[in-house]
Amino acid sequence: MTRSAELYERARRVLVGGVNSPVRAMGPIGRDPLFIERAKGPYVWDADGARYVDYLATWGPAILGHAPPAVMRAIEAALPSGTSFGAPTEAEVRFAEAVASAMPSIEQLRMTSSGGEAVAGALRLARAATGRDVIVKTEGGYHGAIDGMLAAAGSGATTLGVPTSPGVPAGATAATRLVPFNDLAAAEAALDGAAAMIVEPVAGNMGVVAPADGYLAGLRAVCDRAGALLILDEVMTGFRVAHGGAQQRYGVQAHLTCLGKVIGGGLPVGAFGGPREIMRELAPEGPCYQAGTLSGNPLATAAGLAALGELADPAVYERLEATGAALEALIAGCGARVVVNRVGSMMTPFFQEGPVVDYASATRSDTEAYAAFARRLLEGGVYPPPSQYEAWFVSAAHGPEELAATGQALGAATA
Protein backbone atom coordinates (compact mmCIF):
# COMPACT_ATOMS: atom_id res chain seq x y z
CA MET A 1 0.00 0.00 0.00
CA THR A 2 1.27 3.48 -0.87
CA ARG A 3 1.79 6.13 1.79
CA SER A 4 -1.03 8.20 0.20
CA ALA A 5 -3.36 5.21 0.47
CA GLU A 6 -2.43 4.71 4.13
CA LEU A 7 -3.05 8.37 4.90
CA TYR A 8 -6.38 8.30 3.07
CA GLU A 9 -7.47 5.29 5.09
CA ARG A 10 -6.61 7.13 8.30
CA ALA A 11 -8.19 10.36 7.09
CA ARG A 12 -11.52 8.72 6.34
CA ARG A 13 -11.86 7.81 10.01
CA VAL A 14 -11.56 11.40 11.23
CA LEU A 15 -12.31 13.66 8.24
CA VAL A 16 -15.56 13.57 6.29
CA GLY A 17 -14.77 11.73 3.08
CA GLY A 18 -11.12 11.85 4.08
CA VAL A 19 -10.77 15.44 2.88
CA ASN A 20 -11.48 19.01 3.94
CA SER A 21 -12.93 20.11 0.59
CA PRO A 22 -14.99 17.81 -1.64
CA VAL A 23 -13.18 18.00 -4.97
CA ARG A 24 -9.88 17.04 -3.33
CA ALA A 25 -11.22 13.51 -2.95
CA MET A 26 -10.56 12.89 -6.68
CA GLY A 27 -13.74 10.84 -6.95
CA PRO A 28 -14.76 12.65 -10.15
CA ILE A 29 -11.70 11.20 -11.92
CA GLY A 30 -12.19 7.74 -10.45
CA ARG A 31 -9.30 7.43 -8.02
CA ASP A 32 -8.29 8.14 -4.44
CA PRO A 33 -6.53 11.39 -3.60
CA LEU A 34 -2.81 11.95 -3.52
CA PHE A 35 -1.52 13.36 -0.25
CA ILE A 36 0.93 16.15 -0.96
CA GLU A 37 4.04 16.48 1.18
CA ARG A 38 5.70 19.59 -0.26
CA ALA A 39 5.70 22.01 -3.18
CA LYS A 40 8.28 24.21 -4.83
CA GLY A 41 8.18 26.25 -8.01
CA PRO A 42 6.09 24.44 -10.65
CA TYR A 43 6.17 21.09 -8.81
CA VAL A 44 4.44 19.19 -6.02
CA TRP A 45 5.67 15.98 -4.37
CA ASP A 46 3.32 13.39 -2.92
CA ALA A 47 3.76 11.45 0.30
CA ASP A 48 5.48 8.65 -1.65
CA GLY A 49 8.09 11.01 -3.10
CA ALA A 50 6.67 11.19 -6.64
CA ARG A 51 7.07 14.57 -8.33
CA TYR A 52 4.40 16.20 -10.54
CA VAL A 53 4.32 19.20 -12.83
CA ASP A 54 1.53 21.09 -11.11
CA TYR A 55 -1.32 22.76 -13.00
CA LEU A 56 -3.65 22.88 -10.00
CA ALA A 57 -1.61 25.70 -8.39
CA THR A 58 -3.60 25.27 -5.15
CA TRP A 59 -6.67 26.17 -7.26
CA GLY A 60 -5.07 29.41 -8.49
CA PRO A 61 -3.03 31.22 -5.83
CA ALA A 62 0.38 29.88 -6.88
CA ILE A 63 0.75 32.36 -9.72
CA LEU A 64 4.46 32.81 -8.93
CA GLY A 65 4.94 29.09 -8.36
CA HIS A 66 4.98 27.37 -5.00
CA ALA A 67 6.97 28.87 -2.12
CA PRO A 68 8.34 31.83 -4.11
CA PRO A 69 11.43 33.25 -2.37
CA ALA A 70 10.06 36.80 -1.96
CA VAL A 71 6.90 35.52 -0.28
CA MET A 72 8.77 33.10 1.96
CA ARG A 73 11.13 35.87 3.08
CA ALA A 74 8.18 38.12 3.89
CA ILE A 75 6.50 35.44 6.01
CA GLU A 76 9.74 34.70 7.85
CA ALA A 77 10.25 38.41 8.56
CA ALA A 78 6.69 38.83 9.86
CA LEU A 79 6.54 35.69 11.97
CA PRO A 80 8.61 36.86 15.00
CA SER A 81 6.20 39.78 15.54
CA GLY A 82 3.22 37.48 16.06
CA THR A 83 0.55 35.64 14.13
CA SER A 84 -2.56 37.67 14.95
CA PHE A 85 -3.35 40.90 16.76
CA GLY A 86 -7.04 41.59 16.21
CA ALA A 87 -6.07 45.23 15.77
CA PRO A 88 -5.11 47.53 12.87
CA THR A 89 -1.62 47.31 11.36
CA GLU A 90 0.41 49.36 8.91
CA ALA A 91 0.62 46.34 6.62
CA GLU A 92 -3.17 46.38 6.15
CA VAL A 93 -2.98 49.97 4.96
CA ARG A 94 -0.14 49.20 2.55
CA PHE A 95 -2.02 46.17 1.28
CA ALA A 96 -5.18 48.17 0.55
CA GLU A 97 -3.10 50.85 -1.17
CA ALA A 98 -1.45 48.23 -3.40
CA VAL A 99 -4.80 46.74 -4.44
CA ALA A 100 -6.43 50.12 -5.05
CA SER A 101 -3.49 51.29 -7.18
CA ALA A 102 -3.93 48.27 -9.47
CA MET A 103 -7.73 48.40 -9.69
CA PRO A 104 -9.21 51.85 -10.35
CA SER A 105 -12.74 50.67 -9.49
CA ILE A 106 -11.62 50.17 -5.88
CA GLU A 107 -11.27 53.25 -3.68
CA GLN A 108 -11.77 51.47 -0.38
CA LEU A 109 -11.25 47.86 0.65
CA ARG A 110 -12.44 45.51 3.36
CA MET A 111 -10.18 42.53 3.98
CA THR A 112 -11.52 39.06 4.83
CA SER A 113 -10.02 35.62 5.37
CA SER A 114 -11.32 34.00 2.16
CA GLY A 115 -12.86 34.74 -1.19
CA GLY A 116 -16.18 33.24 -0.13
CA GLU A 117 -16.28 35.54 2.88
CA ALA A 118 -15.54 38.48 0.58
CA VAL A 119 -18.49 37.52 -1.64
CA ALA A 120 -20.81 37.24 1.36
CA GLY A 121 -19.79 40.72 2.48
CA ALA A 122 -20.22 42.21 -0.99
CA LEU A 123 -23.70 40.73 -1.37
CA ARG A 124 -24.81 42.08 2.00
CA LEU A 125 -23.36 45.49 1.16
CA ALA A 126 -25.13 45.56 -2.22
CA ARG A 127 -28.45 44.87 -0.55
CA ALA A 128 -27.81 47.52 2.09
CA ALA A 129 -26.74 50.12 -0.47
CA THR A 130 -29.72 49.58 -2.79
CA GLY A 131 -32.44 48.63 -0.30
CA ARG A 132 -33.27 45.61 -2.47
CA ASP A 133 -32.98 41.88 -1.86
CA VAL A 134 -32.72 40.03 -5.19
CA ILE A 135 -29.33 38.94 -6.52
CA VAL A 136 -28.89 37.84 -10.14
CA LYS A 137 -26.23 35.20 -10.82
CA THR A 138 -25.22 33.11 -13.80
CA GLU A 139 -25.92 29.42 -14.14
CA GLY A 140 -22.73 27.55 -13.31
CA GLY A 141 -21.23 30.52 -11.51
CA TYR A 142 -19.65 29.57 -8.19
CA HIS A 143 -19.25 32.23 -5.54
CA GLY A 144 -18.37 30.22 -2.46
CA ALA A 145 -20.40 27.84 -0.34
CA ILE A 146 -22.94 30.54 0.53
CA ASP A 147 -26.54 29.39 0.91
CA GLY A 148 -28.06 31.89 -1.50
CA MET A 149 -25.39 31.24 -4.13
CA LEU A 150 -25.75 27.44 -4.19
CA ALA A 151 -28.35 27.63 -6.92
CA ALA A 152 -27.10 26.11 -10.18
CA ALA A 153 -23.60 26.47 -8.78
CA GLY A 154 -20.48 25.37 -10.60
CA SER A 155 -17.21 24.05 -9.17
CA GLY A 156 -17.56 21.05 -6.89
CA ALA A 157 -21.35 21.29 -6.91
CA THR A 158 -21.40 20.58 -10.64
CA THR A 159 -18.61 18.01 -10.42
CA LEU A 160 -20.43 16.07 -7.73
CA GLY A 161 -23.83 16.39 -9.37
CA VAL A 162 -25.25 18.58 -6.60
CA PRO A 163 -26.17 21.88 -8.28
CA THR A 164 -28.30 22.73 -5.26
CA SER A 165 -27.45 21.50 -1.79
CA PRO A 166 -29.54 19.83 0.89
CA GLY A 167 -29.46 21.97 3.99
CA VAL A 168 -30.06 25.19 2.06
CA PRO A 169 -33.54 26.49 2.97
CA ALA A 170 -35.85 27.54 0.16
CA GLY A 171 -35.87 31.06 1.50
CA ALA A 172 -32.11 31.36 1.04
CA THR A 173 -32.35 31.00 -2.74
CA ALA A 174 -35.74 32.66 -3.17
CA ALA A 175 -33.98 35.99 -3.73
CA THR A 176 -31.58 34.53 -6.32
CA ARG A 177 -32.39 34.81 -10.03
CA LEU A 178 -30.50 32.69 -12.55
CA VAL A 179 -29.48 33.68 -16.06
CA PRO A 180 -27.18 32.06 -18.63
CA PHE A 181 -23.59 33.30 -18.79
CA ASN A 182 -22.92 35.47 -21.85
CA ASP A 183 -26.62 36.28 -22.29
CA LEU A 184 -26.93 40.04 -21.88
CA ALA A 185 -30.64 40.20 -22.72
CA ALA A 186 -31.48 37.65 -20.03
CA ALA A 187 -29.44 39.60 -17.50
CA GLU A 188 -31.21 42.84 -18.34
CA ALA A 189 -34.62 41.22 -17.93
CA ALA A 190 -33.67 39.66 -14.60
CA LEU A 191 -32.29 42.88 -13.11
CA ASP A 192 -35.69 44.52 -12.67
CA GLY A 193 -35.89 45.35 -8.97
CA ALA A 194 -32.64 43.54 -8.21
CA ALA A 195 -29.92 44.72 -5.83
CA ALA A 196 -27.04 43.39 -7.89
CA MET A 197 -25.73 40.96 -10.44
CA ILE A 198 -22.74 38.88 -9.45
CA VAL A 199 -20.66 37.21 -12.12
CA GLU A 200 -17.23 35.72 -12.63
CA PRO A 201 -15.90 37.96 -15.43
CA VAL A 202 -14.11 34.89 -16.77
CA ALA A 203 -16.05 31.87 -15.61
CA GLY A 204 -13.68 29.45 -13.94
CA ASN A 205 -15.96 27.12 -12.06
CA MET A 206 -17.82 25.58 -14.98
CA GLY A 207 -14.42 25.22 -16.54
CA VAL A 208 -12.93 28.33 -18.11
CA VAL A 209 -15.43 30.25 -20.25
CA ALA A 210 -14.49 33.68 -21.58
CA PRO A 211 -16.92 36.59 -21.75
CA ALA A 212 -18.26 37.38 -25.21
CA ASP A 213 -17.20 40.66 -26.77
CA GLY A 214 -19.06 43.49 -25.07
CA TYR A 215 -20.69 41.24 -22.45
CA LEU A 216 -19.05 42.72 -19.36
CA ALA A 217 -19.39 46.33 -20.50
CA GLY A 218 -23.00 45.54 -21.36
CA LEU A 219 -23.61 44.18 -17.87
CA ARG A 220 -22.32 47.38 -16.33
CA ALA A 221 -24.63 49.41 -18.57
CA VAL A 222 -27.75 47.37 -17.84
CA CYS A 223 -26.98 47.39 -14.10
CA ASP A 224 -26.68 51.18 -14.21
CA ARG A 225 -30.03 51.47 -15.98
CA ALA A 226 -31.69 49.14 -13.46
CA GLY A 227 -30.22 50.90 -10.44
CA ALA A 228 -28.43 47.66 -9.52
CA LEU A 229 -24.78 47.04 -8.68
CA LEU A 230 -22.44 44.96 -10.82
CA ILE A 231 -20.35 42.71 -8.58
CA LEU A 232 -17.42 41.12 -10.37
CA ASP A 233 -16.22 38.03 -8.55
CA GLU A 234 -12.52 38.28 -9.31
CA VAL A 235 -11.55 35.78 -6.64
CA MET A 236 -10.00 33.70 -9.41
CA THR A 237 -9.17 36.32 -12.06
CA GLY A 238 -7.96 39.19 -9.87
CA PHE A 239 -4.22 39.72 -10.48
CA ARG A 240 -4.32 36.46 -12.48
CA VAL A 241 -5.49 37.37 -16.01
CA ALA A 242 -3.86 40.82 -15.80
CA HIS A 243 -2.32 42.98 -13.10
CA GLY A 244 -5.63 44.82 -12.82
CA GLY A 245 -7.62 41.61 -13.20
CA ALA A 246 -10.35 40.97 -15.72
CA GLN A 247 -11.44 44.58 -15.38
CA GLN A 248 -8.17 45.73 -16.93
CA ARG A 249 -8.15 42.97 -19.52
CA TYR A 250 -11.69 43.71 -20.72
CA GLY A 251 -11.90 47.44 -20.05
CA VAL A 252 -14.79 47.45 -17.57
CA GLN A 253 -15.25 48.70 -14.01
CA ALA A 254 -17.37 46.99 -11.39
CA HIS A 255 -19.39 48.67 -8.68
CA LEU A 256 -18.00 46.08 -6.26
CA THR A 257 -15.08 43.68 -6.70
CA CYS A 258 -14.37 40.46 -4.80
CA LEU A 259 -10.80 39.21 -4.52
CA GLY A 260 -8.99 36.18 -3.09
CA LYS A 261 -6.51 33.42 -3.96
CA VAL A 262 -3.66 35.34 -5.65
CA ILE A 263 -3.73 38.32 -3.28
CA GLY A 264 -2.75 36.11 -0.33
CA GLY A 265 0.50 34.83 -1.75
CA GLY A 266 -0.64 31.31 -0.85
CA LEU A 267 -2.11 32.16 2.56
CA PRO A 268 -5.84 32.58 3.29
CA VAL A 269 -6.86 36.12 2.29
CA GLY A 270 -9.88 37.70 0.64
CA ALA A 271 -11.13 41.24 0.13
CA PHE A 272 -13.95 43.22 -1.43
CA GLY A 273 -13.96 46.83 -2.42
CA GLY A 274 -15.44 49.63 -4.47
CA PRO A 275 -16.09 53.37 -4.45
CA ARG A 276 -16.24 55.22 -1.13
CA GLU A 277 -19.91 56.13 -1.60
CA ILE A 278 -20.82 52.43 -1.55
CA MET A 279 -18.21 51.16 0.91
CA ARG A 280 -19.14 53.75 3.54
CA GLU A 281 -22.36 51.78 4.11
CA LEU A 282 -20.21 49.25 5.98
CA ALA A 283 -19.76 49.42 9.74
CA PRO A 284 -18.22 51.26 11.50
CA GLU A 285 -19.11 54.12 9.12
CA GLY A 286 -22.51 52.79 8.13
CA PRO A 287 -25.17 50.38 9.35
CA CYS A 288 -24.22 47.32 7.24
CA TYR A 289 -22.39 44.96 9.58
CA GLN A 290 -19.47 42.84 8.41
CA ALA A 291 -16.57 41.62 10.53
CA GLY A 292 -13.80 39.04 10.72
CA THR A 293 -11.55 38.33 13.69
CA LEU A 294 -8.62 37.25 11.53
CA SER A 295 -9.18 39.74 8.68
CA GLY A 296 -5.89 41.42 7.83
CA ASN A 297 -3.93 38.65 9.55
CA PRO A 298 -0.31 39.88 9.66
CA LEU A 299 1.23 36.75 8.11
CA ALA A 300 -1.30 36.62 5.28
CA THR A 301 -0.97 40.36 4.70
CA ALA A 302 2.82 40.09 4.56
CA ALA A 303 2.61 37.23 2.07
CA GLY A 304 0.05 39.10 -0.01
CA LEU A 305 2.12 42.28 -0.12
CA ALA A 306 5.15 40.33 -1.28
CA ALA A 307 3.15 38.57 -4.01
CA LEU A 308 1.60 41.83 -5.22
CA GLY A 309 5.05 43.40 -5.30
CA GLU A 310 6.32 40.66 -7.59
CA LEU A 311 3.24 40.95 -9.79
CA ALA A 312 3.86 44.65 -10.37
CA ASP A 313 6.45 43.60 -12.97
CA PRO A 314 4.79 43.46 -16.44
CA ALA A 315 7.28 40.79 -17.50
CA VAL A 316 5.51 38.32 -15.18
CA TYR A 317 2.31 38.60 -17.23
CA GLU A 318 4.21 38.31 -20.49
CA ARG A 319 5.63 34.98 -19.27
CA LEU A 320 2.26 33.80 -18.02
CA GLU A 321 0.60 34.60 -21.34
CA ALA A 322 3.31 32.86 -23.35
CA THR A 323 3.32 29.78 -21.14
CA GLY A 324 -0.45 29.62 -21.17
CA ALA A 325 -0.48 29.75 -24.97
CA ALA A 326 2.16 27.02 -25.15
CA LEU A 327 0.22 24.71 -22.84
CA GLU A 328 -2.98 25.37 -24.79
CA ALA A 329 -1.23 24.35 -28.00
CA LEU A 330 0.10 21.16 -26.40
CA ILE A 331 -3.33 20.09 -25.16
CA ALA A 332 -5.12 21.07 -28.37
CA GLY A 333 -2.60 19.07 -30.39
CA CYS A 334 -2.51 15.97 -28.16
CA GLY A 335 -4.81 13.95 -30.40
CA ALA A 336 -7.87 13.87 -28.17
CA ARG A 337 -11.27 15.22 -29.23
CA VAL A 338 -10.90 18.35 -27.18
CA VAL A 339 -11.53 22.08 -27.32
CA VAL A 340 -9.40 24.27 -25.07
CA ASN A 341 -10.78 27.49 -23.59
CA ARG A 342 -8.03 29.82 -22.34
CA VAL A 343 -7.77 33.31 -20.91
CA GLY A 344 -4.18 34.19 -20.08
CA SER A 345 -2.74 31.70 -17.62
CA MET A 346 -6.00 29.83 -16.90
CA MET A 347 -7.63 27.28 -19.20
CA THR A 348 -9.80 24.18 -19.44
CA PRO A 349 -9.85 21.35 -21.99
CA PHE A 350 -13.42 20.24 -22.72
CA PHE A 351 -13.89 16.80 -24.24
CA GLN A 352 -16.40 17.78 -26.91
CA GLU A 353 -16.75 19.82 -30.03
CA GLY A 354 -16.78 23.57 -29.39
CA PRO A 355 -17.67 26.21 -28.74
CA VAL A 356 -18.14 26.27 -24.97
CA VAL A 357 -19.77 29.59 -24.11
CA ASP A 358 -21.97 28.94 -21.04
CA TYR A 359 -22.98 26.39 -18.42
CA ALA A 360 -25.23 24.41 -20.76
CA SER A 361 -22.48 23.92 -23.35
CA ALA A 362 -19.83 23.24 -20.68
CA THR A 363 -21.84 20.42 -19.18
CA ARG A 364 -21.97 18.61 -22.53
CA SER A 365 -18.33 17.67 -22.06
CA ASP A 366 -17.52 13.96 -21.77
CA THR A 367 -16.56 13.81 -18.10
CA GLU A 368 -15.57 10.14 -18.30
CA ALA A 369 -13.09 10.98 -21.04
CA TYR A 370 -11.69 13.79 -18.90
CA ALA A 371 -11.41 11.44 -15.91
CA ALA A 372 -9.41 8.89 -17.89
CA PHE A 373 -7.24 11.67 -19.30
CA ALA A 374 -6.54 13.10 -15.84
CA ARG A 375 -5.67 9.68 -14.38
CA ARG A 376 -3.19 8.99 -17.18
CA LEU A 377 -1.60 12.42 -16.74
CA LEU A 378 -1.08 11.73 -13.04
CA GLU A 379 0.58 8.45 -13.97
CA GLY A 380 2.85 10.45 -16.27
CA GLY A 381 3.89 12.96 -13.61
CA VAL A 382 1.49 15.80 -14.42
CA TYR A 383 -1.05 17.05 -11.87
CA PRO A 384 -4.24 18.44 -13.50
CA PRO A 385 -7.39 19.56 -11.67
CA PRO A 386 -9.33 16.47 -10.55
CA SER A 387 -12.49 17.73 -12.24
CA GLN A 388 -13.66 18.67 -15.71
CA TYR A 389 -15.24 21.81 -14.31
CA GLU A 390 -12.17 23.47 -12.83
CA ALA A 391 -9.49 25.67 -14.32
CA TRP A 392 -5.92 24.67 -15.08
CA PHE A 393 -3.34 27.28 -14.04
CA VAL A 394 0.19 27.95 -15.17
CA SER A 395 2.60 29.91 -13.04
CA ALA A 396 5.55 32.17 -13.67
CA ALA A 397 7.72 29.24 -12.53
CA HIS A 398 6.64 26.96 -15.40
CA GLY A 399 9.14 26.94 -18.25
CA PRO A 400 10.40 24.90 -21.21
CA GLU A 401 11.41 21.91 -19.06
CA GLU A 402 7.95 21.59 -17.53
CA LEU A 403 6.23 22.07 -20.87
CA ALA A 404 8.41 19.36 -22.43
CA ALA A 405 7.54 16.95 -19.62
CA THR A 406 3.87 17.84 -20.02
CA GLY A 407 4.05 17.18 -23.76
CA GLN A 408 5.43 13.71 -23.12
CA ALA A 409 2.72 12.96 -20.57
CA LEU A 410 0.02 14.20 -22.94
CA GLY A 411 1.34 11.95 -25.67
CA ALA A 412 1.19 8.94 -23.38
CA ALA A 413 -2.26 9.93 -22.07
CA THR A 414 -3.79 9.95 -25.55
CA ALA A 415 -1.83 7.10 -27.14
Image (spheres, grey):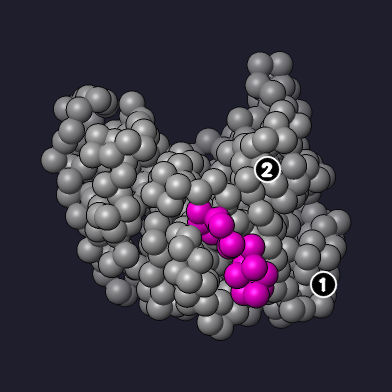
**Residue occupying the point 64% across, 68% down:** 189
In the rendered structure, find residue 309 and report the number of the disc placed on it: none
For mark 1, give the secondary structure.
loop
Residue on which the image places disc 2: 174
Q: Residue furthest top?
A: 13
Q: Is 103 rendered above or below residue 82?
A: below
Question: Can you see residue 215?
Answer: yes
8 or 124: nearer the eye? 124
Towards the viewer: 186 or 341: 186
Residue lying at the far bottom in this picture: please name it: 213
Q: Residue furthest left?
A: 90
Q: Nearer the viewer, residue 88 or 254?
A: 254
Tell me, yes or no, whether the highlighted magenta stretch contains residue 189: yes
Q: Is 399 above or below relative to 292?
A: below
Range drawn in magenta: 181-197
Kindly indicate the quadrant of the structure image that contains residue 210: bottom right
Callout 2: helix, strand or loop? loop
